[in-house]
Amino acid sequence: MTAITEDHTRRAMAKRDQWARNRTILLLLLPGAGYLLFFFGLPLLRTVVGSFTSLDGAFTFDLWVELFSEPVYIDGLFFSLWLAIAPTVVALVISVLLAALLQATFPGRRIFGALYRIPLVVPGIVAAFLVMVMLDRGGMLSRIAEPLGIDLPRMVRDEWGIGAILASTWKNIPFMTLIIGGAMSAINRDVLHAARTLGAGRLTVLLRIQLPLALPGISAAVLLTFISSLGSYAIPNLLGPAYPLPLSVHMYEQGFRRGNWPIVYAMGTLLSVAAIFVLLAYYSLIGRLTGSHARREARS
Amino acid sequence: MSDTRRQKREGRWLAVGLYGYLALVMFVPLVVIALWAFYDPAVGWYPPDIVPTSYSVEPWREVLADRGIIGSLVLSLIISTTVTFLTGALAFPTAWALAHFPFRIKRAVEVFVLAPMIVPGIVVAVSLGEIFFRLGLTQTVLGVILVQTVGTLPLMIRILTATLEGIPGELMLAARTLGASPRRALMRIALPMAWPGFLAGGLLSFISSFEDFEKTFMVGAPGVQPLSVRLWSYLGGEILIFPTAAVVTFILLAPTLIIFFIAERLMKENVLAAGMGKL
Amino acid sequence: MAGLSIRGLTKAFDQVRALDGVDLEVPDGQLVTLLGPSGCGKTTLLRSVAGITDPTEGGIWLGDRRIDGVPPERRNFGMVFQSYALFPHMSVFKNLAFGLEMRRLPRSEIRKRVAQALHLVDMEAMAGRLPRQLSGGQQQRVALARAIVIEPDVLLFDEPLSNLDAKLRDSLRDQLRALQRRLGVTSIYVTHDQVEAMALADEIVIMFSGEIVERGDPVSLYRRPIFRFTAEFLGRTNVIEARLDGDRCRLPWGDERSVENPGIDDPAGVAIRPEDIAISTANGSDPHGEIAERMFLGAGTNYVVDAGGVRVRVNVAGTQNDLIDIGTPVRLTPPKSLHLLRRGRHGSAEALA
């Protein structure tokens, strides 16, 4: 009899403790997560809902139909993707090389380690400005090339967005190098030494040991670079061609210049979906990298 | 030893290559911008001249005579400082909860906190710009601070969480056995030990706020003009004003680089990599 | 196969000399252990041999081929690391196959050799596992197999057993010894554990502060060390200041013994191993001292005896003796003949413990 009541009280107390704990956690989460819920979650929700709402407030698919039928927007979407993928690929190749080289020792390594990161803190507009003064017609490169009889292709406001791609690449290399380098230096040095004593040269160690082991870091860097280039506005606006315009530029023009908010929300939703799609691809890759091990572990 | 000597030679070649790369992509463009900042507008600088034929401080005088530029610099500093402290204060409790309490929806909260880094900033900036317009917050400093904090908060929470996870739970328990209440243990043990995280996250928040253009532009322009927005007005308008833009670039870069090199000295190399290496 | 010679090897970092003119011969097929406290340079020496660290001066020869300056991947030395250093993203099979793939062996040959090596360390069943799915002992066996599957000219061990618990360490140590004997590979084994060193070595090299203190086979090094440092580092010992008179010495508690190596200038004292002293209760006869401390260890009992102003450690083996209480007057019986120790500039190893 008493045993049962005791058990009851204990369970009641445990429940009260649990409740108090949950309240503490909620209070702790409130400032940070609450802020983001309000100033990030709300606008995002409004964007998604707005993409299905006509100007008079009715539910509609018209905006999506418009988005996928107007050549301006279709070209814009592909151009946005091009301006995200191209800098990611170029920056990845250079960053992997830099990260690998930075594992070695050489004179002035510390200073180089600080200097190469400068673009990390340089605004995109300044990156665009650098590209202009170097590569635009009348820029430094053409001033040097012209007397030599070299005719340079147009690189600023060109239809392939070469200038915009170079500016994004320039801005993202340090970030990628930092993350990939961090993933590489987290590898136990003895593992690399072991590979050397087993007969692997430095290139083989890079390809067969360092890169596979740094893959989680590499894919995180790729993901974040892709997304930051996908939404960038200043660089394509300053360096990109008049047509096509990427969706980010369309969003500003349609929203703030024309007040055509519904189509802006549709484009915003589309960009967000593209980003989340890439995030899911990343998670499935990481899942495959670590999950297969977990599965095999579970079997054994 | 022959091998040591060979390694030294390889190291020298590596240094030559890497510094060559640095000169090409960083040093040369900056020098060209410097040339633009010091050319003589009376003479001009036209192709095919590689360097200007005549120099002056005229571009600087012009920019500094426009009193707005100093105002922009001060405004930028005020906004970035406020954003940094706001971010730190908002981030700490959440980071603590994420680092030290197991709870059911933890993974969901982690992903949500990460989301602002995944969803392109322009989406939130445009949408917040429209919402703030209705609330009368567009073209106000408060509006700019609020929108910038959306960008800085996720990074700060991640870095602080990583730092706090590094503090062994036993330490807090030890403080408790020595007579400290949970609150005191938090203030006396966890908060001071989280200092490197605050420092790293704070410096990154400051820099990211100082260099932010897109969010600030969508919410603040044209009424609120920190440096980055002002630089835009010289480059993005109908006419390009290279010399003025060059001068503003240096005024914008100077504080950023100073903070950046302080950060380099103070920060442990791997804080950013640890915070971002795994999402 | 051939022996290894190291001559005048020096490694200077900014301020310190991790190695200072080390000379060492490792005869063909022998196992030499480098023993010393942490920071003594033993690991630097091993890594220089492996080619992971570049010495500042000196040379290394395998037979008559000079190998310093040869990058590690062209030395054909197998190395076993303290942290195992298995490739975490490769299965056990792939880990073993790696070195053979580097040597461009045909697939069938690789499969055959890996199977043989796994059989040697009794890990055939684990070929498909990833390193993280193995226990520490299994990982170290895989690491050993990976080092021997390439049929190395020299095997290098960097404290391979120090991350394992005591029981596992003993059994792996014995397996490792048997394997090395069977393969007859010239080996260098770094450790800070003197029991491990004695159990494994053909020759032990004692190192301190970048230099070799003393070397010898385990038995003579333990029984007749030259320096106080060696005597104290290899096992425990009582170093007792005794009054010398030709080849006789008088111990502090009054006994007199002969000295087996007289004629040493300013010796550090005589060495008496705690297990070499017999102890008995005085029972009315003239006592040498009294029991100050007692520690019962199961397999034996350790005493500290206060005798003539010095503290003497005495270990009594076996479980059938009557325990002697603290404060009891006792008599001590050291061996007939005692061994004198030189001071050397390394001083006492006791301070390092």
Image (tube, coloured by chain):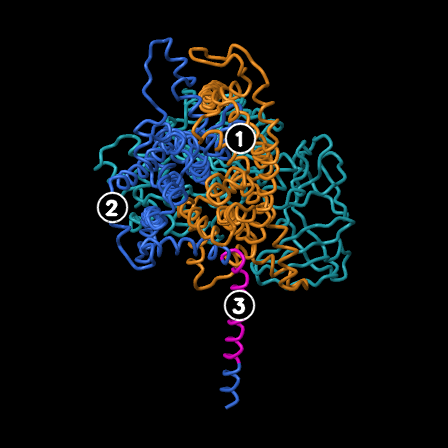
Q: Are marks 3 and 1 on the same chain?
A: yes
Q: Residues within 10 Å of mark 3 (few under 14, many from 20)?
A: few
Q: Name the outermost residue toward the left.
A: C108
Q: Could you say whether the residue bearing mark 3 is in a helix, strand or loop?
A: helix
Q: Chain of mark 1?
A: A
Most foreground residue, C25 or C36: C36
Q: Earlier in the sequence, mark 3 or mark 2?
A: 3
- Residue extent of the magenta highlight: A10-33
Which callout, 3 or 2, points to the residue nearer the camera?
A: 2
Disc 2/disc 1 C-alpha distance (Å): 46 Å
Dot label at residue A68:
2
Dot label at residue B53:
none
Most foreground residue, A296 or C256: A296
Q: Could you say whether the residue bearing mark 2 is in a helix, strand or loop?
A: helix
Question: Which image quadrant is residue A230 in?
Answer: top left
Instruction: Answer with left or right where residue C101 lies relative to residue B266.
Output: left
Residue B95 visible to the viewer: yes
Type of residue at label 1?
Answer: Ala
The residue that mark 1 highlights is: A114
The residue that mark 3 highlights is: A23
Residues at marks 2 and 1 touching, judged by CB atoms closer than 8 Å: no
- Please tell me the colour of chain A: blue
Q: Which chain is orange?
A: B
Q: Chain of mark 2?
A: A
Disc 3/disc 2 C-alpha distance (Å): 47 Å
Q: Which chain is cyan?
A: C
Q: Earlier in the sequence, mark 2 or mark 1?
A: 2
Type of residue at label 2?
Answer: Phe
